[in-house]
Image: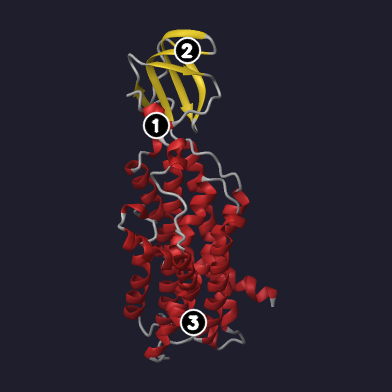
């Protein structure tokens, strides 16, 4: 039995890497958005913003892997009669679905390490405090959304139907979860909708682990919903599996898509009832702002009893890390946002925590 699973995984990997759509949605698509988001949010001067860039890129990658890498690809294989070849063998749908999950995981996980490395090297974002928790949470999100994609593939009678169903799920998750646009810029009525969007919990979980150093236990509600969605998706995928494109399914079967989304709908209803917010932090909040690297220049500095008539202070992660006397290094070389404090007086100590409002009050 194990040999059969390994054989199918090997075959599935070979088929996957030959498809340009798989490579595009798993690598190029999220990487394109990585650099676009980095420019829009000026991640080069703010490691906190870089954490949001990572969150958005990872979420888009998971959505693409789930709905296109699993869903659309499964429909293509049925339409191209690839699945029909397995029908004559003594095999059940279970190994095929498991192979799809494992293949998706193997292909996708290098992207996570690549994005984290680029954010660390290019934008000075610290490595997540709980990297293992992050990788586990991303893995759960990946298999959950691939389960959703496989359910859509199971209930779609054609590629056209499948594409429509995928877009109906994908677009709201892309735009109303914080995956592409910070959710806090929307009016309250729209932010309420985000409670019922599965991708919102993925965004918040990844953001918490990358930005606030949370572990997986801090996101137990999202973990529970992802696990239930995965189990429901796999069961429905096996129950509704079809080997040939000539096999049609009743239109009412499309309602099974609601079943795999139901854990998130119930979780959202509970949070709305309790008055909780799925988004624990804002893109514009203190967590993000504190992680900016700032170079305050031209001020008179009183530091540990020493007076510097014209100096500079380097602030990282809300703390004074270095004090320069005279001309400081170029702000760009430090990946810092320059702040002109000419004519101002600053009293600081190395290692001191600095309030951001006080810093910008110097301008």
Q: What distance separates the C-alpha of mark 3 from that of mark 1?
A: 61 Å
> Which residue has dot 2 on it?
302
Which mark lies nearer to you, 3 or 1? Answer: 1
| 81 with respect to 349 (left or right) | left
| 217 with respect to 110 (left or right) | right
- Circle 2 SS class: strand
Name the residue rendered at 42%, 87% in the picture.
253
First in sequence: mark 3 vs mark 1: 3
| 23 with respect to 91 (left or right) | left
Name the residue rendered at 60%, 84% in the picture.
91
**Depicted 56 relative to depicted 317: above or below:** below
Note whether residue 337 is visible: no
Q: Position of residue 292 (x, y in %)?
A: 43, 34
Note whether residue 229 is visible: yes
> Which residue has dot 3 on it?
83
Label annotation for residue 357: 1
**Depicted 95 relative to depicted 304: above or below:** below
Q: What distance separates the C-alpha of mark 2 from that of mark 3?
A: 74 Å
- Circle 1 SS class: helix
Which of these two is toward me, 101 or 333? 333
**Depicted 159 relative to depicted 114: above or below:** below
In which quadrant will I find the N terminus?
A: bottom right
């Amino acid at each position: 039995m194990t040999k059969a699973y390994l054989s199918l995984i090997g075959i599935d990997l070979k088929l996957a890497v030959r498809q340009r759509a798989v490579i595009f949605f798993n690598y190029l698509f999220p990487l394109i958005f990585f650099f676009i988001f980095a420019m829009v949010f000026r991640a080069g001067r703010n490691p906190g913003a870089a954490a949001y860039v990572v969150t958005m890129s990872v979420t888009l990658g998971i959505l693409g892997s789930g709905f296109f890498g699993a869903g659309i690809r499964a429909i293509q294989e049925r339409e191209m009669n690839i699945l029909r070849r397995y029908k004559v063998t003594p095999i059940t749908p279970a190994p095929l679905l498991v192979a799809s999950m494992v293949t998706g995981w193997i292909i996708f996980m290098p992207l996570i390490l690549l994005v984290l490395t680029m954010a660390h090297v290019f934008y000075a974002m610290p490595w997540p405090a709980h990297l293992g928790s992050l990788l586990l949470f991303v893995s759960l999100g990946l298999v959950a959304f691939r389960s959703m994609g496989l359910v859509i593939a199971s209930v779609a009678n054609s590629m056209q139907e499948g594409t429509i169903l995928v877009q109906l799920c994908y677009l709201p998750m892309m735009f109303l979860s914080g995956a592409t646009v910070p959710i806090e810029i929307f009016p309250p009525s729209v932010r309420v909708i985000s409670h019922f969007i599965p991708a919102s919990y993925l965004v918040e979980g990844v953001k918490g682990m990358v930005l606030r150093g949370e572990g997986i236990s801090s996101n137990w509600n999202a973990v529970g919903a992802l696990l239930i969605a995965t189990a429901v998706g796999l069961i429905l995928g096996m129950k509704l599996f079809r080997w040939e494109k000539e096999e049609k399914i009743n239109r009412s079967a499309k309602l099974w898509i609601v079943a795999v989304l139901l854990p998130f709908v119930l979780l959202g209803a509970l949070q709305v009832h309790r008055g909780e917010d799925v988004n624990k932090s804002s893109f514009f909040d203190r967590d993000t702002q504190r992680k900016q690297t700032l170079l305050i220049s031209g001020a008179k500095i009183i530091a540990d009893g020493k007076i510097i008539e014209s100096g500079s202070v380097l602030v990282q992660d809300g703390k004074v890390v270095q004090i320069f006397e005279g001309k400081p290094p170029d702000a760009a070389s430090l990946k810092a946002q320059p702040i002109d404090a000419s004519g101002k007086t600053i009293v600081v100590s190395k290692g001191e925590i600095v309030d951001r409002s006080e810093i910008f009050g110097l301008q």
